[in-house]
Image: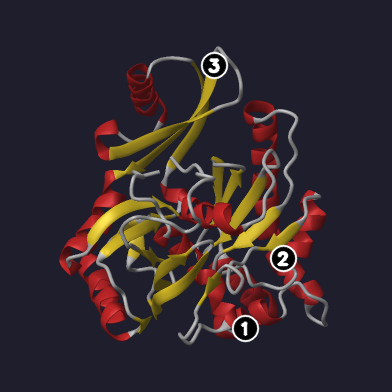
Amino acid sequence: MLKRNMNAPLFYHKKPMFGLDIGSQAIKVMQLQARGGHAHVKAYGSIQTDDKIVKDGVVSDVRGAAKLIDELLSSNIVGELSTNRVVMSVPVSRVYTRVITMPKMSKKELADAVKLEVEQSVPVPSKNLYHDFEVIDTGDAASQLVRMVAVPKAVVDSYAAVCDLLKLDLALVQTNIRADAQLCLLYEDLVSGNPYIILDVGGSTIDIGILDDTLRLTGTVDEGGNSLTKAIAKKLKISETKAHKVKITQGLSAGKQQASIKEAIEPILEKVVKEIERMVRFHQERILPGTDISQILIVGGGANMPGMGDYLTNATRIATRLSSPWGDHISFEKLEPPESADLPRFLTCAGSAMASDHEVFV
């Protein structure tokens, strides 16, 4: 599972891979190359899509997705991809995750116990699931916390089918929040023992994770950047295109429309706050008692809405800021970079590109 090796150079992996993120609004790719504690972008690109390509986490139009990705890889790439090995990500909302307490036992006994727990607690037949788990050490000599992850085979198999059509080598499938965490654990200057929250604002969902030296807990809200845009459009009686522009240029920052925008999107943000509070309570009661969340880091394509950090800081009483590796840790060097407003949407791709060769689905 994802654990930082303090003796290994940052951004290191043995074989080149690139990240591929199929979103509800766009498909993105990115490949990075390490240079000590820094990395530079070898290639990146995106192409617009729609929510008909993916339904409930499954690539429902495999040929349509493959055609778009083929167009992206052949015509819309800045730089040059040097590998056909790919890491893909799925939303947390399409993955079943549970954290449970189990007695200490052998690896085989634990694997059997997890399999039984998946069969009993996940509302999908186990034959239709891929599952994995990791042990969370809490210092208890008699028991251990186990984080289980299960995903419908239909989701992973649809991604594999796309790769088969394109002759891509699918190395790994992981959750969006795992990919985000993978990158943040490398470039964020975090102190051990001070867990933090990562908030991935996607197009259709907002994924949430609690991390310290590994991903401890995940959650999701079935609202995202698209929901925020639609709420603003309805309230201000404008088109969704204009509402999107209002969202990324004005957001919740001071202005003559601030009150109306806040009224429109606050019900969605309140759901986010409630999910954060639920996860923090669980973390403090079950995972690492006595520890406080140090900060909230906002990532994802919807992370660039002005004022969101201040809103969450006030609502949760946890310092919130935008997390960005671009410039200091990841550079584009001679490549023309994307528009600054588009950079957050590539973070999951960058995290996927930095996956380790030894990892399995998590």
| Amino acid bearing label 2 | Met
Q: Please rate how many residues cluster around mark 2, counting C-alpha atoms within 10 Å: few if below 14, some from 14 to 19, many from 20.
A: many
Write down the residue under mark 3.
Answer: 143
Earlier sequence position, callout 1 versus callout 2: 1
The one of 204 and 104 positioned closer to us in this rendering? 104
Q: CA distance from mark 3 to mark 2?
A: 39 Å
x and y, in percent, of residue 40 in the image: 47, 72
Q: Quadrant of the N terminus?
A: top left
**Residue at (47% x, 86% y) in the render:** 334
| Residue found at the far top of this picture | 142
Residue 123 seen in the current view: no
Disc number lying in front (1 or 2): 2
| Amino acid bearing label 1 | Lys
x and y, in percent, of residue 65 in the image: 27, 70
Q: Please rate how many residues cluster around mark 3, counting C-alpha atoms within 10 Å: few if below 14, some from 14 to 19, many from 20.
A: some
| Disc on res. 245 | 1
Q: CA distance from mark 3 to mark 1?
A: 51 Å
Q: CA distance from mark 1 to mark 2?
A: 15 Å
Asked which secondary structure carries label 2, the reply is helix
Write down the residue under mark 2.
Answer: 308
